[in-house]
Image (cartoon, grey):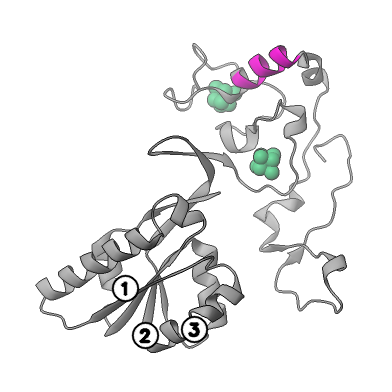
Amino acid sequence: MIKATHKRLERINEMIAPHSEVLVLGCETCTGICLVGGEKEVARMAANLRLLNRKNGGKKTFTEGVVRRQCEMEFLDGAASLINDADAVVSLACGVGMQAIAEHFPNMPVYPGNNTAFLGLSPELGLFSERCVACGDCLIDRTGGLCPIARCAKHLFNGPCGGSVAGKCEVSPDVPCIWQMIVDRMMRLGQLSKLEDIKGIRNWKTNDAVGPRAYIREDLRSTPPKLDSVVMKPVAPKGGAA
Ligand code: SF4
Ligand code: SF4
């Protein structure tokens, strides 16, 4: 899921300076689950902004709301009156949810209350860790289900750089070398020979180097879409990851 952290309170306070009725709007899905966008976090953020505003002699009002998923327009429609009653929104969703508000409510200023961090998981309570950079062409069938793009500091595809010491990455010595983990796992799975298949130069057209990306599911559409992004095409395997 998408992981995020709160922005500094003082920074949010600066953003909302011109506004008097501010809605703090959370999202129950990704940022709710990583505890920066749910009902409790919305209440805490609104209370902290209220206190800071009063301390500075301000008279702003802060309302609170949470939608199931801020990145989907139908859930935003359900909060339309709450949004339209405010003169600005502080979003505690990810960057996608924030932009959904900007697109769906063209006259409503929206400000980020969170920094969107990465696609990751929470292996332990209170630890959030990156696992995927959404490259658009998953290759982890060849690497034992572990991702060298998101988790190797050098994004190496064909084995370790040779600099790791005691299973740790030479770039970040506190972090396990993902290539050591890949080799260990493939040995356990009896698939080590797969690593002898050299992966050629990767076609990066599916990653964000091309600009904003889109894909179309023709089976879900009756009319052609209005495009605002580069449509991703399946990548032809040319020795590279496909
Ligand atoms: S190969 Fe790409 S899609 Fe697959 S886990 Fe890594 S970054 Fe994500
Ligand atoms: S030590 Fe391992 S994880 Fe770090 S850059 Fe080298 S191969 Fe990648």
Residue at disc 3, CB closer than 8 Å to ligand 1:
no
Sequence-wise, which precedes: disc 3 or disc 1? 1
Query: What residue sits 80% from the left and 37% below the top?
Result: 241
Q: Residues within 10 Å of mark 1 (few under 14, many from 20)?
A: some
Whole-Å distance between the Cαs marked 3 and 1? 22 Å
The answer for how far apart the CA atoms under marks 1 and 2 are is: 15 Å
**Mark 2 highlights which residue?**
86
The residue singled out by tag 1 in the image is 15
On the question of residue 19 being in view, the answer is no
**Left or right: 162 with respect to 94?**
right
Q: Sequence order check: which comes first, mark 1 or mark 2?
A: 1
The prevailing secondary structure element of the residues shown in magenta is helix
What is the span of residues highlighted in magenta in the rendered image?
Answer: 181-189
Q: Residues within 10 Å of mark 3 (few under 14, many from 20)?
A: some
Residue bearing the label numbered 3? 80
Residue 235 in the figure: left or right of residue 149: right
Secondary structure beneath dot 3 equals helix
